[in-house]
Amino acid sequence: MVETVKYANPQSTIRNPQSAIRNPQSVVETIKWEDGILNLIDQTRLPTEAVYLSCYTPEELAKAIKALVVRGAPAIGVAAAYGVVLGIKNSRARDYQELEPELNRVIELLASTRPTAVNLFWALNRMKQTAESHKHEDVEQIKRVLAEEAVNIHQDDKRRCQAMGEFGAGLIRDGDTILTHCNAGALATGGMGTALGVIYAAHQQGKKVKVFADETRPLLQGARLTAWELQEAGIEGTLICDNMAAQVMKEGKINLVLTGADRIVANGDTANKIGTYGVAILAKEHGIPFYVAAPLSTVDLNLKDGDQIPIEERSSEEVTGGFGKQTAPSGVKVYSPAFDVTPAKYITAIITEKGIVRPPYQESLAGLF
Amino acid sequence: MVETVKYANPQSTIRNPQSAIRNPQSVVETIKWEDGILNLIDQTRLPTEAVYLSCYTPEELAKAIKALVVRGAPAIGVAAAYGVVLGIKNSRARDYQELEPELNRVIELLASTRPTAVNLFWALNRMKQTAESHKHEDVEQIKRVLAEEAVNIHQDDKRRCQAMGEFGAGLIRDGDTILTHCNAGALATGGMGTALGVIYAAHQQGKKVKVFADETRPLLQGARLTAWELQEAGIEGTLICDNMAAQVMKEGKINLVLTGADRIVANGDTANKIGTYGVAILAKEHGIPFYVAAPLSTVDLNLKDGDQIPIEERSSEEVTGGFGKQTAPSGVKVYSPAFDVTPAKYITAIITEKGIVRPPYQESLAGLF
């Protein structure tokens, strides 16, 4: 059963940073694990409604991931880890041998939700390995260990966001204006965010920063989520359509570009929300540095270059009628890749929880592991 | 009084190219002058409804231009010429001296509607000069001459579209796929279009062409108008979000980019719908030629470079609530320039009704006049 839980008006949370929806960095708590239930802020309903969706089963979570109730590479990873716990909590397996096929079924279900972000597979793999390393213990103990491991993955993600923020904030000068694309904030992670986390850290250091947010068609994560997060954090944000980024850069309004990532491969090529690649080219053309912020759980050294990253294509309705109104003629053909790959040559530096790496990425990324 | 006149279901017009909404090139008739009434296809209601809006006064037309019932630089020019006729048709002036202030008032009203496209001022100026050159004739004769001049401007625009089409089609090879931005088709002109006119001409020559249409936020002229026109013309079109253009280019899907223009100045710098500048940079980065198609009425040799072109900024609601649903948090700051300027260095060639010109534009454009 899935039910929604209304929480306080988001405006009120600005006045009350101690409220339940705040995490220690005083940003929105996207994922809450409470009494064995996974509560996710329903991101399809922001910014006009801020409610949590409760998931009791991995099937409900899989549906929620596909529907983008929870999205953002690190957040999907954290949610999936909890999903594994949901999937085995009522298991009647008497030993690991009986538990393993159930575990595999849950992991396969969750792994099939979205193909591009690697954090999903990373988190599921970590859960599987944890279970295996306890395979001689009794099932109740394995369940406990897995629940602890999911919480660890979540807490690690928070710490990683914090560390990325601290490293990345050094790249931001007082008075800078930053362009960001999509949402790489608290809503995309288990903590305060990747790209927005860096901006929050700079803001917390007392630097006066401003942000331009690309609205990020088709699903408007920039307009719906990033603009909302910036308001909540008290940071000046300006919303633009994606096709205005070049003009804003030409007008000298942008000092740096900062985005998140869904998968970074061995040579530094980076998959991220569709449109990121174009923004990177525009930044290069205007002499503006282009930074990516992502935890090491987003780095996939198994892939040599960006051509190997599977790119999810999403339904045409998101383009032609995503807002409840038909905006293109019936029967129109649509191409809608959800991600693109920015070649490493456009990326000035990558901000991770272990520090900032620069080209050549082949060496600098490998050096982090 | 403004009333709407329903015309046949747009689907049915495919089957009946002789129907009233077809012009000789077998494309939609955007502007119809019938019995002293100006009928405009209401472009705010496409693609789900295809109806004409009848304008009886210049005030109604001014409102229609501001609301984008009619849009596209050449179409605005043609409509404004008819608007001058509407403005003086009931005049009781006994001579030109009495008529002139009425004429000036109408011209000022229409000139105040939109600042960027120069065709508006060009058409109004041509109407004013025509009146002045007949100032010694009686008022009824001046009214007749002005009505004829408006029809001439409209017919000229049709011929110009045809000529541009024929010149431009030479740049398109059989099998090419063209990326276009916004709508520079029959709906943007008094004829078959500028950029789309070139594509229609290539199609009519039997070349197999495909088109990718940027949806063109915030008002989705690509999704609503270009995709619709391409369906009507039987040309294969694929709709993408603006931020997908770079990815589509990277995948090798685009052979050339072709857009219209709202104002081209002496050095070749070109104002067009917001997003055009970004597309031009992406084309350059991918080694794809970038062409502009526009009649000489769009060329403004009075301005030295693009920095002198006034850029209209439109309301934030078009960005935050354009789909009939709130898509950004209340109170969000928005920046929404309606146009940008593509520097001449990104433009491979400009297609006009007098031929195709190439850099240096300072000389080649001046040579056309």
Image (tube, coloured by chain):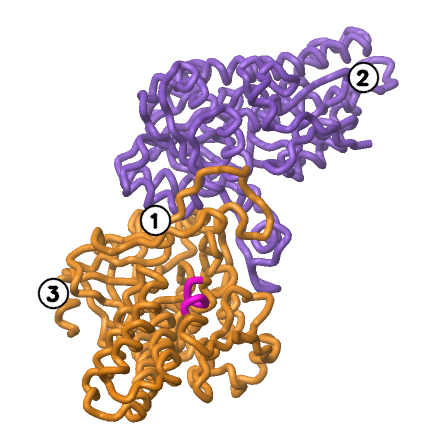
Chain colours: A purple, B orange
Badge 1: few (under 14), some or many (20 or more) residues near its Cα, within 10 Å? many
For the residues beneath circles 2 and 3, the answer to whether they share a chain is no
Lower position in the chain sequence, tag 3 or tag 1:
1
> Which residue position holds label 3?
B363
Rendered image quadrant of residue A350 = top left
**Amino acid at the residue labelled 1:** Gly
Image marks 1 and 2: residues in contact by CB distance under 8 Å: no
Q: Crowding near pointer 2: few (<14 within 10 Å), some, many (20+)?
A: few
Residue A46 at least partly seen: yes
Q: Is residue A111 left or right of residue A350?
A: right
Q: What stretch is highlighted in magenta?
A: B62-66
Give the residue at mark 1.
B278
Q: What element carries label 3?
A: helix
**Quarter of the rendering occupied by the N terminus of chain A:** top right
User: Type of residue at label 2?
Assistant: Gln
Q: In this view, does A249 lie above or below A301?
A: below
Report whether residue B275 is seen: no
Instruction: Check whether the beta carbons of the residues at disc 2 and disc 3 lie within 8 A of each other.
Output: no
> At numbered mark 2, what does the secondary structure look like: helix, strand or loop?
helix
Q: Are marks 3 and 1 on the same chain?
A: yes
Confirm whether the magenta stretch covers residue A71.
no
* Residue to which mark 2 is pinned: A97
User: What kind of residue is marked 3?
Assistant: Glu
From what the image shows, is residue B58 above or below residue A114?
Answer: below
* Residue at position x 28%, y 43% in the image: A250
